Image (spheres, rainbow, N blue to C red):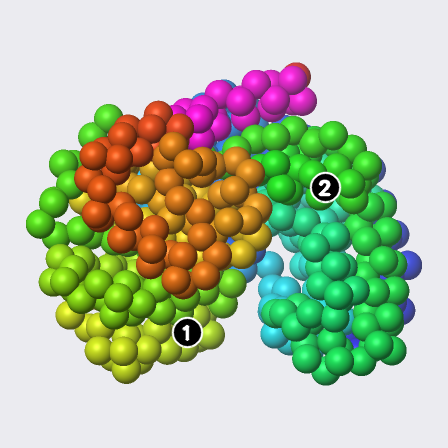
Amino acid sequence: MVVLLSFCILLPIIILILLILRFKYQKKRTIAFFHPNCSAGGGGEMVLWVIIKVLLQSFPNYSIVIFTADTSPKDKILEKVKSTFGFDFLDCNITFYQIKHSYSLVIKKYPFLTLFFQAIGSMICCFDALIKCNAEYFFDTTGYAFTYPFAWLAGAKIMTYTHYPTISTDMLSVVQNREVSINNTNTIARSSILSNMKIFYYKIFAYLYYLVGNLASLVFVNGTWTKNHISQLWKIQPHLLYPPCDINASHPNEKNSSCHLIISIGQFRPEKRHLVQIEAINILVQEHPEIKNKIKFVVIGGVRDAEDLKRKEEIIKTIEKDQLTDIITVPENTSYEQKIEYLKNAEIGLHTMVNEHFGICVVEYMGFGVIPVAHKSAGPELDIVDDQCGYLATTPKEYADAIFKIINDPEKTAQMRQAAIQKAKKFSVSAFEKHCEKELLEFLK
């Protein structure tokens, strides 16, 4: 609350400084990316670095700036990018500016009014960034839409690649239906007064989200689910640009029929629901003990912070409790090259996140001939998986049944594998680069 009060008191001074930056200190032909976790190694970072690759190749006269919370030296960040994604930017014209107040973006700091306080936190970070470098173009690739007013006041043209809306009608429906979820505690769900207050809060926030969203001049979204929500919230028609997915459709290995390798790729975030995957494997071996010695499950995940590490340890404990250590492994620090090898050799890929805006890992599976078993919602359901190239599921039992079908019907699985490889080409890095370059050429000309 002290930070909020200080922010409100200083707001007129902040606006004055931004206007001075607008007219006196703007760096022309500079594109600044607002991406605090630029080295995190997730799908959002893949989008960031492929866009930068396109800009460096097609717009060599522009300078690239990245606002980041990472305190590592430039070469360390770029070495991690090379290790994670395979892109070599070590000799490229990229400048990093550290955001001092990135702690204000951490959701767990705000037990109530989370969206509001995180929005204020993003504005504080944005002001800090603009003081360091006021670029001609401000490119948000993380979804912090409340940075746009400050960037706009400083004179920047705003571009955004929005992976998912900050608020959605789905979130509102959860509160209206009095459901318990990650964003709606049991205390609120049980109280009609608190639920009505939260609905009012969400509606006010949605209107503010509409106002800031309309400051963006170029809006990319990553899939049909996000496009529908952003169109409804911002009253615009954004550009649908499927995220770049790391596929190698020409060289998937022959699958080992004697040992069926199942994989899962995703950061150890709560919404990824890794424990559902463990439960599905447990159900599978309980119902079909004859295949226990014929399957291996590798959980490939990235750790961002102490909370992620805690979740990873919980997964390992669950594996031990369920006596699945002979089947399931959770490798340490999987490199890009190791991930590719897993993809080349795997037969089945699991995805369990509810309402994932797109689902890059699902496409990665398909590109390597890995049959996806994905959650029946949002991106996987609307854009990626159909009954020709994979399975959709909602419960652990449905996941277990789908895995058994894939293992038990090699002829159909072979057909699905080829269909998956063909479908994945629609979401390749080259397809992303082509469409991204086309839109940027039009916008930056």
Question: Is residue 430 covered in magenta?
Answer: yes
Question: Is residue 10 covered in magenta?
Answer: no
Vertical side of 196 occupied by 228: above or below: above
Q: Which mark is residue 230?
A: 2
Q: Which mark is residue 311?
A: 1
**Residue 435 in view in this figure:** yes
Identify the magenta region.
Answer: 425-444
Placement of the C terminus among the 4 image quadrants: top right
Vertical side of 418 occupied by 232: above or below: below
**Residue 43 in view in this figure:** no
Give the x, y percent position of residue 56: 47, 28
Which SS class for mark 2? helix
Q: Classify residue 22 by image quadrant.
A: top right
Which SS class for mark 1? helix
Residue occupying the far left of the picture: 258
Residue for point 79% across, 64% down: 176
Give, as a three-letter code, the residue at label 2.
Answer: Ile
Residue for point 25% across, 38% down: 413
